[in-house]
Image (cartoon, rainbow, N blue to C red):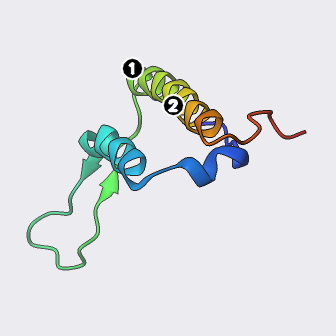
Amino acid sequence: MKLRTDLLEHLTAADILEEAAANQHRYNAEPSFSKTGIGHLSPRSTADSANEAVRSEALIQKLTRRLRKSGKNGARPS
C-alpha cells in the first residue's frame, strides 16, 4: 500500500480492522505445546498480492472521498 500521509487522519479503526481481517488467513499460531504466545505470518501468494493491491486502491478511494467530504483539499502532497 502506498502511504498517503494526507489521508491518515481519515483512517478509522474499522478500516484497520478490515485490513487485519483480510490478512488473518495468513497467520499461523504457534504449536499448542509452546507457551510464548507468538505465531507467524505465512508468505503471501500471488493471489494475496493481487487482492492487497485491489484493497489498497479501494481504501485510497474511500479515504479520498472522506477527505473531500470534510472540506479539506484533496490534492496529493508534493
Q: For mark 2, what is the residue?
A: 62
The local crowd at label 1, few if under 14, some if 14 to 19, many if 20 or more residues have their Cα within 10 Å, is few
Amino acid type, residue under disc 2 in the picture? Lys
Amino acid type, residue under disc 1 in the picture? Ala
Mark 2 or 1: in front is: 2
Left or right of 55 in this view: 7: right
Which residue is painted at 48% across and 21% down in the image? 54
Whether 12 is drawn above or below 30: the answer is: above
Q: Which mark is residue 30?
A: none
Total marks in image: 2
Residue 40 falls in image quadrant = bottom left
Residue 8 versus residue 51: which sits nearer the camera?
8
Whether 73 is drawn above or below 31: the answer is: above
Residue 6 versus residue 45: which sits nearer the camera?
6
Q: For mark 1, what is the residue?
A: 47
Q: Quadrant of the N terminus?
A: top right
Left or right of 73 in this view: 23: left
Position in image of residue 71 (x %, y %): 68, 40
Q: CA distance from mark 2 to mark 1?
A: 22 Å
Dot 1: element: helix
Dot 2: element: helix
Which residue is painted at 51% across and 31% down in the image? 62
